[in-house]
Image: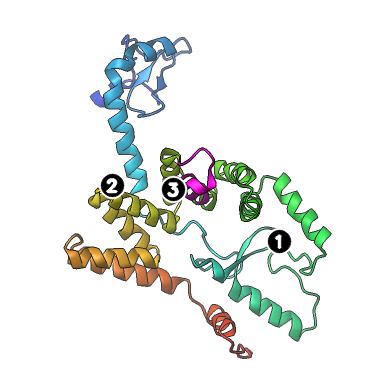
């Protein structure tokens, strides 16, 4: 930020050290740095920041909390899963309806995978990954080699998958190691899994760590993870902070999360959610689910239920 003339009074406050009052020099002599927590004041040195801390602490804490809530309660544009890499439609938050490619670790909807397989069989082609075109049927060693390459490349999907594998084996220390790496790379699902693990004493020999659990669930929710937001809403209900719980449930329901929609309905029936809020959440919930549907995905759904997909010209 430049502190040249013409700034508003509020902005000019950011052009002086909050402790000693020295102004930022237009040259290179004095460069002010923002408070890392609240970004509302600046300091010319670490010494000034430490000296001003007792005066600034309360305001800083409140401003940081307000900024966190602004991010936390913002309706995400899409879920953390994003779109299918082939049909470009939003992926369903139902994990049974998507698959992770072992070769390139891309998330693909099962509708695209099924119709690619049908096409290959019809044209008698060698089965290949629908995205990266590597051959699909790999030996155990080939698959492991490709997967390890993705881990070495710090692919968040691969790191999370490995963390999930260790978790299923009961090795929670290694599981958390890989999930933490993926979370640091911004993987929302890893944040969610870490949040659930830190909130469950069965996974940790040292017991629960609810501060870390809340942090990871909030990071996942901010990234568009509706199940993480549902858990946050449940925590807020337990803490008797119903206004925050309702916000979480409405945002998650609007992303297509069914259990959250049920919570919103209960809130409406008990008077905690207005008619307008309920109607808006219901419309958004239905729209989010409809956005994930396609003829190919419907055919896959039928095949899962035991019906043979119809032939397409």
Asked which secondary structure carries label 1, the reply is loop
Left or right relative to 224: residue 14 = left
Distance, label 1 to label 2, CA atoms, is 42 Å
Quadrant where the N terminus sits is: top left
- Is 194 a magenta residue? yes
Residue behind mark 2: 239
Circle 3 or circle 2, nearest the eye: 2
Q: Give the image location of residue 82, x and y in percent.
A: 51, 60
Query: Disc 3 and disc 2: Cα gap in Å?
Result: 16 Å
Q: Residues within 10 Å of mark 2 (few under 14, many from 20)?
A: few
Residue that carries the numbered disc 1 in the rendered image: 102
Q: Which of the two discs, 3 and 1, labels the residue nearer the N terminus?
A: 1
Location of the C terminus by quadrant is bottom right
Q: Mark 3–mark 2 contact, CB under 8 Å?
A: no
Vertical position of residue 9 compared to residue 248: above or below = above
Q: Which residue is mark 3?
A: 217
Mark-to-mark CA distance, 3 and 1: 27 Å
Would you place residue 271 above or below residue 312 in this image? above
């Amino acid at each position: 930020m430049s502190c040249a003339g013409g700034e508003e009074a509020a902005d000019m406050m950011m052009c002086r050290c909050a402790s000693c009052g020295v102004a930022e020099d237009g040259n290179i002599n004095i460069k002010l740095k923002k408070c890392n927590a609240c970004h509302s004041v600046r300091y010319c040195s670490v010494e000034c920041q430490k000296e001003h801390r007792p005066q600034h602490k309360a305001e800083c804490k409140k401003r940081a909390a307000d900024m966190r809530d602004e991010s936390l309660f913002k309706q995400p544009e899409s879920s953390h899963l994003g779109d299918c890499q082939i049909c470009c439609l939003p992926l369903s938050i139902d994990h049974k309806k998507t698959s992770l490619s072992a070769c390139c670790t891309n998330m693909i909807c099962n509708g695209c995978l099924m119709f690619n397989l049908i096409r290959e069989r019809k044209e008698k082609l060698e089965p290949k990954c629908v995205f990266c075109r590597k051959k699909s049927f790999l030996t155990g060693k080939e698959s492991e080699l490709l997967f390890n390459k993705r881990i070495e490349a710090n692919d968040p999907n691969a790191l999370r998958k490995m963390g999930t594998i260790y978790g299923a084996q009961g090795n929670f220390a290694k599981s958390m190691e890989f999930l933490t790496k993926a979370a640091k790379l911004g993987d929302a699902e890893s944040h969610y899994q870490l949040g659930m693990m830190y909130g469950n004493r069965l996974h940790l020999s040292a017991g629960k760590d609810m501060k870390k659990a809340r942090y990871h669930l909030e990071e996942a929710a901010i990234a568009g993870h509706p199940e993480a937001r549902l858990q946050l809403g449940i925590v807020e209900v337990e803490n008797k902070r119903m206004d925050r719980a309702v916000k979480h449930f409405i945002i998650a329901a609007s992303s297509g999360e069914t259990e959250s929609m049920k919570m919103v309905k209960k809130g409406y029936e008990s008077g905690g959610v207005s008619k307008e809020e309920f109607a808006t959440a219901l419309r958004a919930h239905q729209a989010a689910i409809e956005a994930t549907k396609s003829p190919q995905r419907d055919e896959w759904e039928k095949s899962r239920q035991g019906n043979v997909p119809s032939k397409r010209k």
